[in-house]
Every structure is written in structure tokens, then in C-alpha cells.
Amino acid sequence: MSPRRPAAAAAAVLVVCWSSGFVGAEFATQDAPVTTVLAWRTLLAAGLIGGWALLRSERVRPGSLLRQAVLGLLVQVVYLGGVFAAAGAGVSAGTSALIAALQPLLVAALAGPFLGEAVTRRQRVGLLIGAGGVALVVAGDITGGGAAPVAFLLPVAAVVGLAGGTLLERRWGPAESLVVSLALQSAVAALVFGAVAAARDEFVPPADPGFWAAMAWLVVLATVGGYGSYLLVVRRSGATTASTLLYLTPPATAAWAWAMFGQAPGPTALPGVLVCAVGVVLALRGAAGAVDGRRRAPAVARPCR
């Protein structure tokens, strides 16, 4: 199997678990403010995954702390904070999803100069088709939502944070295991979100069992399953491939919303899912073709000296 073609299991877990985060967030914010949700989600994740790392006797190199802190700030603090803050500021979920669809395009544009990853014409076409599919899936929810113009910078910041963290993760190629990376990044996010929640007097969680059920959902499915599999695909198959798979999360989110809340998808959702699938398949085949082409390329003979 091509190293850039993600294993089917990892890709499926990424799509299903990443999209589950939106459902868990809707559950959790019914009982608590956003800052409380983010603080306890990351705190519980850091404790659970950190305990797992200790049981595995994982070692952390001093030099890795700064790298993982930067990645945690970008991928968890900036991304999660931007998405949740945008929702709180009145930006509709559809608009945020459409802006998020720019992330794979941004990663693909920077993967060449920043990582040396070849992005083929087929990949670029597939990414553009995938973005169009996302627009169709969320077409019924693309509105301003009464948000102030400056609020639309929040999902843009989230996209930049996720793209930056993805590119740095691939470029640095951290030697730390996924368990250590998740634990350290969650701990950094917990410090930031915890401080914000405490400053707003919103750190104390509610006693409602529904809140803790939502926390379990967010920690196990969204953080461990979703972000853990995302890191795995980035490390094994590349930044562009991992980002491309995110095009399938809006359709998966629509399926979650229908199953959990009875929210029927709009009339353009099914065509959008099909368009997303075509774009993702085209982009992933383009990535595999780029690797196969490099492997088949004959070595250049060097002159004897």
C-alpha cells in the first residue's frame, strides 16, 4: 500500500469520530457555557491519555515539550476555540463548515513549498470538487446567522490554526508516540481553556449527568478517536491526504445530526455527499499516483570521477 494512501480503518475512524465532535458539543453546551465545556473536555482528555502514557512507561524528551505545546496551541486552542467562539458569536454551522472546507486547499497550497510534498493536478481538481460538495451539503445552513462581520474571522482563525498545526506536525515528524502527543497537547489546551473559564467564573462544571455523558463522548470519540486518527494519518500518509479526508466530515456530521437529533438533511445534502466522495477519491488517487510516479522514475546516472 502506498504510504500516502491511508489505511481504510484509520480513514473511517477519522471521518466518523471527527464529525462526532459537533454532536458532542451540541449536547454539552445545553448544560454549560462553551468555556466550561472546552476546559473540562481538554482537562479530562489530558488526565485520561496522560494516565495511559504513564501505564505504558512512555518517556518524554525535554525538547519535545515546546514542539507539542506549539501544536497544542494551534490545533486544539486556536481550532477548537475558533469553532466554538464562532458558534457563540452567531456564525451558522453551515457557514463555519464552508470556511473549514478551505483548510485542505490551504494545506495543499503550502505542502509543496513547506513540506516538499508533490500535489498533482488531479489532487487539486479533487480538492476543488470536494469543496463544492461541502457547499452543497451545508447549503441550507449558509447564512450570516446575525453575526457581526468580525465574527467571521473566528472560523478563519480556526482553519489557519488547524492547517498550521497539520503542516508543522508533518514537517517536524515528532518522535513521540501518538499517546504522548495527545496527552501533552491536551494538557496545553487545558491550561489555556481552564484559565479562560476561571477568569470568567465558568470553571465549575454542572452536576447534570448529561454534561458528563457529553464529556465522555467528546473525550473518547472526538479527541482520542478523531484527533488521534487525524495525527496518525498525517504521520503515515501526509498532510494533504489527512486534510482531504476532512471533506467527508460535513456529510458524516449531517448523518449524526439526523440520527441523534432527527434533523433531516436538506435537499442538496445527498448530491453534496456524492460530490464530496468523488472529490476525495480523485484527490487520494492523485496522491497515490504522485508517489508511484516517483518510485517508477529512473535514477539519474552520475558521471564517474
Image (cartoon, grey):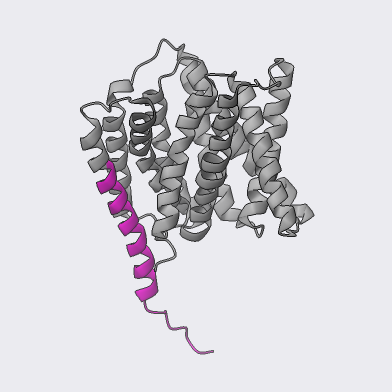
Q: Compared to 304, does 151 lie above or below?
A: above
How would you classify the magenta stretch by its main secondary structure? helix
- Quadrant of image for the C terminus: bottom right
Vertical comparison of 146 with 129: above or below: above
Image coordinates for residue 206, horizontal then vertical, percent: 65, 20
Q: Residue at x 25, y 36 (%)?
A: 272
In this picture, residue 235 sits left or right of residue 93:
right
Q: Tell me where residue 293 appears, x and y as whole percent.
A: 34, 69
Count of numbered labels shown in the rendering: 0
The magenta stretch is: 276-305
> Seen in the image, is 30 located left or right of residue 68?
left
Q: In terms of image quadrants, where is residue 37? A: top right
Residue 90 in the image: state x and y as whole percent: 46, 14
User: Against 302, is 197 above or below?
Assistant: above
Query: In this view of the protein, which residue sits in the foreground, 26 or 260?
Result: 260
| Residue under the image location 46 percent in, 20 percent down | 152
257 left or right of 114?
left
Quadrant of the frame with the N terminus: bottom left
Residue under the image location 70 percent in, 21 percent down: 203
Residue closest to the eye, 116 or 207: 207
Of the pair 54 and 93, the residue shown nearer to us: 54
